[in-house]
Image (cartoon, rainbow, N blue to C red):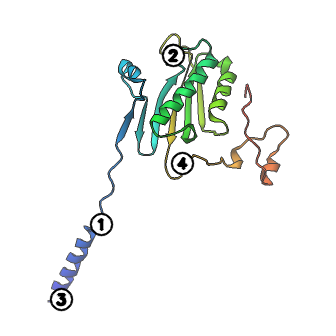
Amino acid sequence: MHRLPIFLVLAALSGCASLQPAPPPAPSAQFVVPEGSEFVSNLFGYSQAVRVGPWIMVSAQPGYDVDKRGFPETLAEQAAMAFKNLALVLAASGATLNDVVSLASHQTDMEQFPEVVDARNEAFGEHRPTWTAVGVSALPLAAMQFQISATAYVGPGGVQGAAPPAAVAPAAGNETLESAEQGNPPRFFNRPGY
């Protein structure tokens, strides 16, 4: 007789476990092909970006000038145009350059890296995502000298408006780590040739 009530209690408790809500479905991938760049997607068979939840992965953006239908002549001009193209693809994905957390660039002449740093600084200002820059002997098209890809995060806790920790900012000029410890973090400066 005493076994019956215990069985009923156990059955009732096991029924409670099934009342828990199901976990939300995993986010699906959204393939982004901004208006005006469909020819690239059709020609080469890839998306300009893919968004999965708050994460956006942007394919390498060349310095192609859509208005002029060609590549600028110099690597510096191509780098500046590539960062503009990156911003356009991010906008079509619901993000901005301030949401970028990581960059990877490829260029055919590393001696011109300071010009790429200038183009990056012009595009990003004080925002400092991680960056891997790679020198290569060639890119997919003969006229290409530069391309940039990115990963962005948009959502709660995203990088938009967040200040980098003072501990990672290198000292510049006559500023020292001691000034950072006193609450005056040094600014981050890109220096040619570093």
Sequence-first tag of 3 and 4: 3
The x, y position of residue 111, in whole percent, is: 68, 17
Q: Which residue is mark 2?
A: 139
The C terminus sits in image quarter: top right
Q: Earlier in the sequence, mark 3 or mark 1?
A: 3
Which sits earlier in the primary sequence, circle 2 or circle 1? 1
79 vs 177: above or below: above
Tag in front: 1 or 4: 4
Mark 4 vs mark 2: which is more N-terminal? Answer: 2
* Residue at left offset 79%, top offset 47%: 177
| Disc 4 + disc 2, Cβ < 8 Å | no
Alpha carbons under labels 1 and 4: distance apart: 30 Å
Residue 153 vs residue 22: left or right?
right
- Amino acid carrying label 1: it is Gln
Decide: few, some or many residues near mark 3? Use Cα within 10 Å; few <14, some 14-19, many ≥20.
few
| Label 4 crowd (10 A; few <14 / some 14-19 / many >=20) | some
The mark lying in front, picked from 4 and 2, is 4
Q: How far apart in space, not on screen, are marks 3 and 1 (Cα)?
A: 29 Å
Disc 2 element: loop
Q: CA distance from mark 4 to mark 2?
A: 32 Å
Disc 2 and disc 3: Cα gap in Å? 79 Å
Marks 2/1: CA–CA distance: 53 Å
Lateral position of residue 43 relative to residue 111, left or right: left
Q: Which residue is mark 3?
A: 2
Dot placed on the residue nearer the N-terminal end, 1 or 4: 1
Q: Which residue is mark 4?
A: 158
* Circle 2: residue type: Leu
**Left or right of residue 60: residue 128:** right
The nearer-to-camera label among 2 and 3 is: 2
